[in-house]
Every structure is written in C-alpha cells, then in structure tokens.
C-alpha cells in the first residue's frame, strides 16, 4: 500500500516542537550567542527547518525511495544511456577500507596498492581502445570530451596551427555534449548531416572538409545503433587534412574486444565506465570519464598520470623475509606539455575501481561476450518491435535501435511520449524519446546484455498491447505513479528553486 | 500574413519581403509545422540587432522541453529589428506564427529568394517529413 501521508513535503508534516532526539538539559551554564559570535556572523532570523520526529523522517524518505525506478528494480531500456546491471561484487570491492579509507595526501609509498590498480586500469583502457596513453582524471564522459579537446588544442598550439584550425565537425545525431565541449574548448562547431539510415552523409562531409578542421567528433557505433560504414574513409580524410578524430566512447559497450577505436582511426576517445563496465548510473553517484589518446598526443594529457618504475635492485631472493618489490608506482607530474589538472586529486577512483573489477572479472573473452550479447539482445528486440513500429535505419543494429511513433501520431495522435509514459504503468522504465532528433517521434531502445530473453519478450508484448490501447488512456498515462505528468514548460520557465517554507 | 504569400526555407523558416527605405527587408519567423514539431517552447534567444547573417547559417535559438534548436537565417544580410517581446510571449509562435510570432527583420544584402520554396512546395516537404 502506498503511504501518501508520510510522503508529503517535510514542511507540510512539520509540527512545532517535534524532534528526532531530545537531549537532556545542559548542566553547563548557557551563554547568549551574541557574546560568542560577532554581530556580522549572526543571522537576523533562524533558518526555516521542518520539525518532525525520527520515524516520520525515516518513513518519508523510505517511501519516496520506493517510488523511483532503477536497474535494480526494473528493466531500464534507456537508449544511449546503457543502463546495464552493476554486479554487487564491484560495489563491495570499491567499498573495502583498503581503498575507501585512503587519503589522497597520504605519502605515495603508502598508496602503492591503489596506484598499482590505477596503473593497470590505464593499461587495460589503452588495450581496449587501441590507443597507447591514458588519463583517468576526468570526472564524467562530457568532462573527458572537454579534456581531450583541450589536449587537441594544446597539440595544435604546439604545432603553431591553432589559429588556423578552428573547426570541429560534429554529425547531427551526436550527443549534445559534443558540440558543447567543442565550444567550451574554444572551437567553432560545424554540423555534418546524416542520412536516414543513420550514417554520415558523405557528400555533406566532404563539402565541409577543409584545412581549418581541428577535430571530427564521432560516435561509433552512433546514436541510432549503426556502425559507421565509411569510418575508415572519414578518418583518412580528416587525417589527410591534418585534423584529429575524436571517438565519443558512449557506445563502447557494443564493440569491446571486437574492434578498437585506435584501429579504426580515432586519435582520442573517452570512456563512460558506468555504461561500458560498471559504476553508478546518472545521479547515482560520482562519475568518471577516462580518456585515451595516440602517442603524439600523450605529452598533452592532464597531469599527473600513474607511472610504473622498475626497481633494478629488487630482491630476487624469494626466501627473504621482506623482498623488495620489482616495481613501484608513482604519480608523474613532470609533464611540461600537459594541459594540467582537470580534476582534484586523482579523479573519482571509487568509480574506476568498480570498472577495474568488472574488467578483471570478465577478462578479454568475457568482455567480447558482453558486447556480443548486448548486440544480440538489441537485434532480437528490434526483430519484434519492427512489426509494431517502423525502424528507419533498417533491420540490423548494434547495441541499440531507434523506432518511430510517427505513424501512430498521424493516425490517432499518440506520441512517443505517450507510449513512454504508459510503459511506466506496466513496470518498465521508459526508453529514451525524442533523441536523436534526426528521427521523428523517436523511441530509442537499448536492452543491454544484462537482460534475459523472457524480459525482452515481456517488454515487446507490453509495447504491442499499449499500441492497441485507446488514445485518451495513453495521453493521460502514467496512471499508477505518484506523480503523473509534471508541467515541463512551467518547470523550465518558472522553476521553484527554493522552498517557500514556513 | 497569409502563409500562401510567404517563402520557406528547407529548415522551416518563413520569409516575407517588403521594401523599406529603398532596401529589401525580410521579415523572418518559423513555420507552424516547425512550432508543432518543437513541442512546448520554453526559451528563445533573439539575434542581436546589427548582426550580419548568412543564408543557411544559424542566427538564433529556440529551446523546447525536448531540445535546443537552431533557427537558420533564410536570407543573408543585417539584422535591423527583433521582436523584443517574443521571448516572454512564446505562445505567439503557436497562436500567430506568421504574424505576431515574427522573430527578426533582416536587411537583405543579396536580392532574390530563388533558394527558397513557395507554400505548396513547403507543404509537400512537411507531409513527407511528418
């Protein structure tokens, strides 16, 4: 039963005098606050705080927490976001005091275990991307994009070409963060068109190519789930002009161990460890967006990076009580061409640890199987959904596909949003809708490798059932959630940013 | 203005040209089809007066609950006036896209609207896109 009483606003539940804990009267004499603090430090009025008892607070938040959907509670086919299941063992490993209780200001010799793990993580990411240098610092995927573009800018500055190279090419179905990162890094964005099947419009691409190109940012596989058919031609053309290719690694989940960005022409890439490996998803915790680059860009990476230093005098006598290790790990700050720090300390290592555990658990063959199953699941679902809704890109996909609700909208006014909202009533998180904008009424589905055939069948069955439902029922969905449809226009135009309390 | 008298760009902007002080001045807005496709609009960033714009290049932005979208200049020239009250009365884009919902006036630097479509051709494009 839903408890709607305790999920009211805490300020509505507030009753003067309610307390979580009551302390006994102090046996130390009280002093007026004015005697203890200067007038400039004193507020004119007390802060407005709700007054509630402990069980009220616990019920309030516990009940609210159950109104959420998560990968742990529901199938979550959110295209482009790769909401894969996070194995709990990775959480446990990252929470071990040996990692979690470290302080970044500890002397380096007491951080050897952590640095060792991070160094291996750099090497794994390099191997998976086919790019030989890595920075673990960026705190999120978009931050990684920005950091990599700073690296590109530093590289062109060093070559004396930064004045000439102002342009960053971005296909029109890219993530919005790509053009935003490019502008923040000081470049101009030029949009390249894509075709109905999702691939880059090569006529438009070649028309926009000139000697002012600094970087092409490309997502491959792209946001409609297509592996770019002309990837090699695109990368060659950019390199011939002296430009760099940036690979948005958001969709690495589709190609692990199958192909590598460094092998298909990328000079730089970021990872989204939460999408590709394991880590808290959107809003569930801090993120990480490590980047890998080619040899020639390596000197410009954010400093420090973790360096392995061999100990030539290491004890080879295994019988010694305390043999010297064969190597130690150090934070390398001596990188004169580096763009500098992009994050305090060493980035969000807790996230990297989860990803490290994921990589180690699966191993090379296992990671390849992850991608093969992600692609298989997406194609299986596509093969059913294509009978319900058109899929402009065709019959095959990588890890995700984009269907269109356009025919329904024309027929009876049912939109992608209506279908998405109605799915919530059946216990499925909604797919991504209205992205990419290149497909009208788009519904972007990404099942990930975590899901069983039974779950995929159940989802397709519900979708089929919903499509046959009455339009008015769909317009008003969801019918079973605590809040149905928020007023998005009002939320954007007149947001309530502070509570009118008391 | 009647939509049938306007010219349209592929990217869904409309143009109406009149002579003002001896120059060709284009009044520019976005089509009813575009407004509907954008869904609920929440913000608009007008171009600045005096800005030089080129046909086919973005010159201002509209933001809906779905996304931020560029508005492309349908003609080249200088922005000489903008609809100042529009950002606070975005409903005009829906209620009167070809009237009170105009966005800007551009003093044209190049004559001719040959690169634009008439209403019938534009309607045909819209029915293919929807």
Image (cartoon, coloured by chain):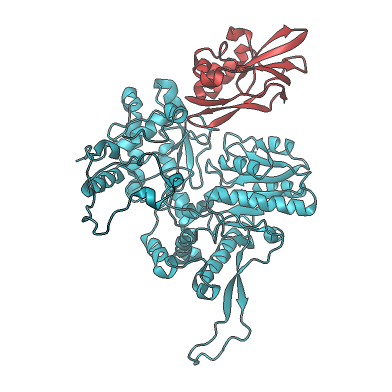
When asked about the image quadrant of residue A45, the answer is: top left
Camera-side residue of A353 and A496: A496
Instruction: Give the chain coloured cyan.
Output: A
Is A165 left, or right, of B125 in this rendering?
right
Look at the image and tell me whether residue A489 can be seen: yes
Quadrant (top left/top right/bottom left/bottom right) for the C terminus of chain A: top left
Q: Is residue A436 above or below residue A24?
A: above
Instruction: Give the chain coloured red.
Output: B
Instruction: Tell me which residue sits at (40%, 42%) in the image.
Output: A43
Is B87 left, or right, of A202 in this rendering?
left
Q: Position of residue B58 (x, y in %)?
A: 66, 28
Is A413 left, or right, of B48 in this rendering?
left
When asked about the image quadrant of residue B114, the answer is: top right
Q: Position of residue B3 (x, y in %)?
A: 58, 10
Instruction: Tell me which residue sits at (38%, 59%) in the image.
Output: A87
When asked about the image quadrant of residue A335, the answer is: bottom right
Camera-side residue of A82 and A38: A38
Q: Is residue A470 above or below residue A304?
A: above
Look at the image and tell me whether residue B127 can be seen: no
């Amino acid at each position: 039963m839903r408890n709607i009483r305790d999920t009211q606003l805490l300020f509505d539940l507030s009753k003067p005098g309610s307390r979580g804990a009551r302390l006994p009267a102090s046996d130390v004499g009280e002093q007026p606050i004015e005697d203890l603090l200067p007038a400039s430090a004193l507020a004119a009025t007390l802060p407005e705080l709700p007054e509630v008892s402990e069980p009220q607070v616990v019920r309030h938040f516990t009940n609210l927490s159950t109104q959420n959907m998560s990968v742990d509670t529901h199938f979550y086919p959110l295209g482009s976001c790769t909401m894969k299941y996070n194995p709990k063992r990775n959480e446990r490993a990252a929470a071990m005091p040996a990692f979690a209780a470290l302080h970044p200001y500890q002397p380096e010799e007491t951080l050897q275990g952590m640095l060792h793990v991070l160094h291996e993580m750099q090497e794994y990411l390099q191997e998976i991307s086919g790019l030989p240098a890595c920075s673990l610092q960026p705190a999120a995927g978009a931050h990684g994009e920005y950091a990599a573009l700073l690296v590109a800018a530093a590289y062109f500055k060093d070559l004396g070409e930064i004045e000439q190279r102002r342009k960053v090419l971005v296909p029109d179905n890219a993530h919005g963060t790509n053009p935003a990162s490019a502008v923040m890094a000081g470049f101009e964005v030029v949009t390249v068109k894509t075709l109905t099947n999702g691939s880059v419009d090569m006529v438009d691409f070649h028309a926009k190519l000139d000697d002012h190109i600094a970087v092409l940012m490309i997502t491959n596989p792209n946001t409609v789930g297509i592996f770019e058919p002309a990837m090699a031609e695109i990368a060659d053309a950019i390199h011939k002009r002296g430009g760099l290719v940036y690979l948005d690694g958001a969709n690495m989940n589709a190609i692990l161990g199958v192909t590598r960005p460094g092998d298909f022409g990328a000079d730089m890439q970021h990872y989204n460890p939460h999408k590709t490996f394991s880590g808290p998803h959107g809003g569930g915790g801090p993120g990480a967006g490590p980047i890998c680059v080619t040899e020639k860009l390596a000197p410009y990476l954010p400093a420090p990076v973790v360096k392995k230093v061999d100990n030539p005098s290491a004890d080879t006598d295994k019988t010694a009580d305390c043999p010297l290790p064969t190597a130690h790990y150090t934070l390398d700050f001596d990188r004169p061409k580096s763009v500098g720090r992009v994050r305090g300390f060493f980035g969000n290592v807790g996230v990297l640890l989860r990803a490290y555990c994921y990589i180690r658990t699966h191993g090379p063959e296992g990671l390849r199987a992850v991608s093969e199953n992600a692609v298989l699941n997406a194609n299986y679902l596509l093969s059913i959904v294509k009978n319900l809704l058109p899929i402009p890109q065709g019959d095959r996909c990588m890890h995700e596909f984009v269907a269109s609700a356009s025919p329904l909208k024309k027929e009876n006014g049912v939109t992608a949003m209506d279908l998405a909202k109605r799915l919530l009533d059946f216990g499925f998180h909604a797919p991504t809708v209205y992205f990419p904008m290149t497909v009208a009424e788009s519904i972007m589905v990404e099942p990930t490798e975590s899901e069983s055939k039974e779950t995929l069948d159940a989802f397709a069955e519900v979708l089929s059932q919903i499509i046959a439902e009455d339009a008015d029922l769909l317009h008003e969905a969801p019918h079973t959630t605590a809040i149905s449809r928020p007023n998005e226009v009002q939320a954007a135009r007149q947001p309530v940013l502070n509570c009118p309390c008391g | 203005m009647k939509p049938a008298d306007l010219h349209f760009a592929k990217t869904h902007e409309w143009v109406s040209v009149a002579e003002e002080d001896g120059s060709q001045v284009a009044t520019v807005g976005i089509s009813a089809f575009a407004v509907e496709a954008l869904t609920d609009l929440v913000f608009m960033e007008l171009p600045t007066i005096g800005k030089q714009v080129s046909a086919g290049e973005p010159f201002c932005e509209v933001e809906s609950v779905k996304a931020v979208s560029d508005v492309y200049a349908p003609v080249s020239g200088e922005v000489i006036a903008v609809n100042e009250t529009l950002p606070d009365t975005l409903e005009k884009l829906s209620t009167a896209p070809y009237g009170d919902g105009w966005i800007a006036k551009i003093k044209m630097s190049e004559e001719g609207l040959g690169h634009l479509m008439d209403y019938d051709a534009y309607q045909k494009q819209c029915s293919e896109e929807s």
